[in-house]
Image (cartoon, helix red, strand yellow):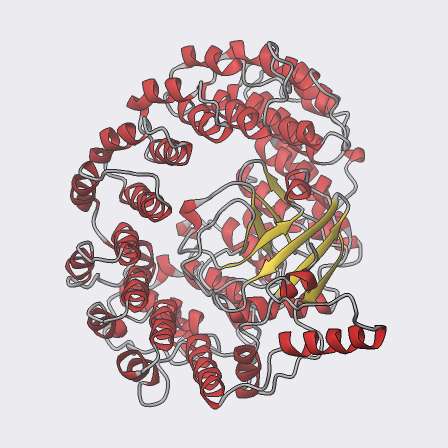
Amino acid sequence: MGPTARSFRHCSIACPARLTAYGLLLTAYCFLVSCARQELSLQERERNRIFAQILKCEDQRTFGADDFLKNQLEGSPDAEVRQWCAIALGRIGDARALPWLYAAFRSAYRDVRAAAAFAVGEIEDREMLKEQSRQPDGRAVPQLAGLLEDPAVQVRMRAVEAIGKAAPAAYAVEIAGRMQKFSYDGSPHEQAYLALAITALIRLQNPVAVPLLERFATETDPEIQWRAANALFRMRARGARATFLRLLDSPSPDVRAHAARGLGICEDPDLAPRLHRLLPPFEPSTGNRLPLSVRVCAVQALGNLKNPESVRPIEAALLGAPVTQANPDQVNFAVQAAAALASIGSPAAEPALVSLLKFRGPVANSAVVALARLLRESSDRDRFYEIVQPGRFSTPAEIRSWAQALGELKGPRAIEHLKQILIGAADQEAASSYALAVPSVLEALARAEAPDLSQILPAYLSSRDGVVLRAAVAAYKPRPETGRNWEPLIQAYGLMAPGTDLEAKIAVLNALEPWMNEPEVEAACRLALKDRQRNVRLAAARLLSRSGATDIPQDPGPSETLKTTASYEIVAASRRDSKVAVLETTRGRIEIELYPHEAPITVDNFVALARRGFYNGLSFMRVVPYFVIQGGDPRNDMEGGPGYTIHCEINMLPYERGSVGMALSGKDTGGSQFFITLSPQPHLEGGYTCFGRVISGMPVVERMTAGDRIIKAWIENDAPFLDFRHF
């Protein structure tokens, strides 16, 4: 059923057989008009105006004139407006809003209480407090704990989720105690509450929760079983091996996959044989295809267990089906198998890795890095150059992999090859394959411990390419005795300050932290307090505060934005429009329902990029089976974007299989890169903007391999014909 058909499916009309052709046309016309949305009421126009104002406050990271958000949260007669305000305050992340949110905990409206709890969790998130050098508000956890008694399960869900973000690890005792008394009946609401409670325990990382999680792993509901197994894995609960072994025989692929992954943390090589049977493309006893999720989790676990006896079963699994683009499951398995073979570290893995080098694309790229890791400890390290011919690497992705391999291999010969790539980049045009590999080369030189790196880096520390500059800053480790080591970084910030590369500016400032006692460095950070970008000002304030400065402004001021008041009004007015993004890819078509109501600015940005053809021809450069596929980067190395960043719009949507989110390298660093989840990923919730979901073509998503392309992307508006809206 196409998007337009979905708009009409709730409308019905009688069509007597005696109607003439003219009558049928007239009836169809009336049908279309009746399904169209008419001119908005004054009340709805006012809601749009308020929503636009909330968007403006949120995007500029301010409370609005005369504390607009506070006043609307406390006094709006519209419960949905209050809910919007609570979410906006959570996104802004200013602790001064906490008293307003605590007051909203007493709201008569269930959804307002839930949104307020979610917002407090965002503001008081432990990782955010650490990043901002901010002390937690002592009232937050007790206030949230009070909501655990709320009569509405939706409120209790958000309270336990927020406690997982904001509370100290010891609070896991309280949550575990409550969950011990929890009688699970399988209802959707209870399943959702239990899922968020388990995620909270993951975030609290307290071993006291392990017995409870093992108990939940015995539930008959596979949804709860895999969540419990996932929690045990993420908490590194090595003592849960018996639970993982039992779940390995589950009929649910999700449960088996998480159980296999869990065995990988148990540090017992003798467990490896239990995983070998999960590697082949087909089950030997039945001939049924084994899900890629199970195979990949098993081979990753074997890499962790490091049993040399696993090399042969992995090699047999690689031979069990052709590694061709027509068989993407085997391609993706081979990429993960190469990494696992390197982790096992047995010399017996060399023939299997060499055989993978004959393939081009992601398999060979993974294999060359794995082979370098394997041979690094060999007495005959130079044999690597007899096996791998440098001339075969020509595309940017191949050259990056070659550089990464050289960094893993180390040694004088590897360093010399890396320098040759830099020379090639300098001799060719900026868009060449070599130039795009420069950041990877700088990273590899640092990993290889090039003795003359300090002489190489100055040229790149003065680069105006933010990606190159960030790589150079990350590699910059000057010796203390050389003196005035901060000067290149101050100069680098000066070059970048007029621009909009948020990540580059923050990277430079963070690199200055060891020298904060130097007057010149303090002066540079004080200058950064006036940067055009709010997040840069926040980073400078954090560094100054850590160095002991007490005269730092509490409010860094509004965030820069390119949007106008009219822009916010247009976005607000279209928040209920149904939009579908269509990606025609080399694997087939993917249709994504976008969520303008939940992430309006993110959706507006994605739609604008798609309509101008930005995504056409771009690759899915990152494919991690059973996790995500990621695309939207014109550089194809996970470092590129559209030339600007947008703010995060964290919301309460879950990351389920097929959810679409914005890729980030830090808070508010979204731009054009997006990802699609291949399985539920609860740890991403509350941290990455979810702005859509795949409604058609999920098998296409699951067949993606790194390098598969978006041929064309476009937007279809799912709106009735003769739409008479006026704003």
Asked if residue 127 is positioned above or below residue 268 in the image, the reply reads below
Toward the viewer: 78 or 273?
Answer: 78
Task: Residue at 17% x, 55% y: name it.
Answer: 149
Q: Quadrant of residue 210?
A: top left
Q: Position of residue 201 (x, y in %)?
A: 28, 42
Q: Residue 381 vs residue 583: left or right?
A: left
Q: Quadrant of residue 674?
A: bottom right
Q: Residue 458 vs residue 634: left or right?
A: left
Asked if residue 567 is positioned above or below residue 444 in the image, the reply reads below
Q: Quadrant of residue 612?
A: bottom right
Toward the viewer: 10 or 145?
Answer: 10
Task: Residue at 19% x, 36% y: name it.
Answer: 180
Q: Is residue 410 visible?
A: no
Toward the viewer: 691 or 527?
Answer: 691
Asked if residue 650 is positioned above or below residue 241 in the image, the reply reads below
Task: Residue at 57% x, 67% y: name it.
Answer: 603
Q: Residue 252 vs residue 570: left or right?
A: left
Q: Position of residue 224 (x, y in %)?
A: 37, 35
Q: Is residue 595 visible?
A: yes
Task: Residue at 45% x, 58% y: name it.
Answer: 485
Quick one: quadrant of the N terminus? bottom right
Quick one: quadrant of the C terminus? bottom right
Asked if residue 87 is positioned above or below residue 161 in the image, the reply reads below
Q: Position of residue 275 (x, y in %)?
A: 49, 16
